[in-house]
Image (cartoon, helix red, strand yellow):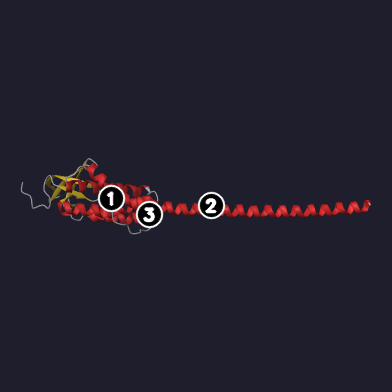
């Protein structure tokens, strides 16, 4: 059977955004209602399943080749860069990152991982957003591993090393804020103690005054006796 030219070839590794890294297992034609359509059969290891994708739809779905080693290294370096502030509305943030995942460039996927990792240090991610983060991180890890010819576990360690300084920096800031709050509490306690001590002194003075009155009464009694 003669096939038209294809962008991908059999046994080639590809990225299928929102699905994972896959491998082209077969390119075949199928006739449906007198129309012949060419398909890619892609095996996705992360879900252990095969998907059939019409060749003409591959580009629209964002299916692409694995990036070069240079681009993979650049993505790693991006992970360690400062993160711009993002909306605190998780639903809006989720939709924005989902759109990036569907676009599927390695830069977009890297930004998702970096953004959500940083956000997870601020507050625990909602379930849907956590799943999105896990999907993006797995996709990024697998692609970089293939591009650099490294073991997946080694790449996971590299990703963690790049991301952790961001998390540590944020945790330090949070700790400083907490310390300030504790200092304010201690200061308030000191003020309360000082106020309490002042009241006690006033009470003592009042008692002294009462003693003086009693002494005067005793002197008057002595005069009467004389």
Marker count (numbered): 3
Q: Secondary structure at mark 2?
A: helix
Spot occupied by residue 20 in the image (x, y as percentages of width and height)? 23, 47
Give the label, 3 or 2, closer to the camera. 2
Spot occupied by residue 138 in the image (x, y as percentages of width and height)? 26, 46
The residue labelled by disc 1 is 162
Q: Is residue 62 visible?
A: no
Few, some or many residues within 10 Å of mark 2 (<14, 14–19, 20+) = few
The residue labelled by disc 2 is 186
- Whichever of labels 1 and 3 marks the residue nearer the N terminus, that label is 3
Near-viewer residue (88 or 38): 88
The answer to the question of whether label 1 and label 3 lie on touching residues, with beta carbons closer than 8 A, is no
In-image side of 191 versus 84 (left or right) = right
C-alpha span from label 1 to label 2: 38 Å
Near-viewer residue (155 or 41): 155
Of the numbered discs in the image, which one, if any, rests on residue 42?
none
Of the numbered discs in the image, which one, if any, rests on residue 90?
3
Near-viewer residue (180 or 201): 201
Spot occupied by residue 53 in the image (x, y as percentages of width and height)? 18, 49
Residue ranking furthest to the left? 2
Residue pictured at 74% horizontal, 54% vertical: 206
In-image side of 108 versus 191 (left or right) = left
Near-viewer residue (204 or 199): 204
Residue ranking furthest to the front? 226
Q: Secondary structure at mark 1?
A: helix
Spot occupied by residue 119 in the image (x, y as percentages of width and height)? 36, 52
C-alpha span from label 1 to label 3: 24 Å
**In the depicted structure, whether residue 220 falls above or below residue 47:** below
């Amino acid at each position: 059977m003669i096939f038209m030219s294809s962008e991908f070839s059999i046994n080639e590794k590809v990225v299928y955004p929102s699905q994972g890294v896959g491998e082209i297992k077969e390119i075949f034609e199928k006739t449906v209602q007198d129309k012949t359509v060419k398909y890619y059969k892609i095996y996705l290891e992360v879900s252990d399943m095969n998907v059939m994708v019409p060749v003409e739809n591959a580009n629209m779905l964002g299916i692409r080749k694995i990036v070069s080693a240079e681009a993979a290294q650049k993505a790693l370096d991006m992970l360690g860069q400062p993160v711009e502030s993002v909306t605190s509305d998780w639903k809006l943030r989720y939709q924005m990152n989902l759109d990036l995942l569907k676009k599927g460039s390695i830069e977009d996927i890297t930004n998702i991982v970096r953004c959500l990792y940083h956000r997870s240090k601020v507050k625990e991610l909602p379930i849907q957003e956590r799943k999105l983060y896990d999907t993006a991180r797995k996709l990024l890890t697998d692609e970089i591993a293939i591009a650099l010819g490294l073991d997946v576990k080694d790449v996971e360690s590299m990703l963690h090393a790049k991301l952790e300084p961001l998390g540590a920096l944020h945790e330090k800031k949070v700790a400083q804020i907490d310390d300030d709050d504790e200092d304010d509490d201690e200061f308030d306690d000191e003020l309360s103690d000082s106020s309490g001590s002042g009241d006690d002194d006033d009470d003592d003075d009042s008692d002294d005054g009462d003693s003086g009155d009693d002494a005067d009464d005793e002197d008057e009694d002595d005069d009467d006796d004389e």
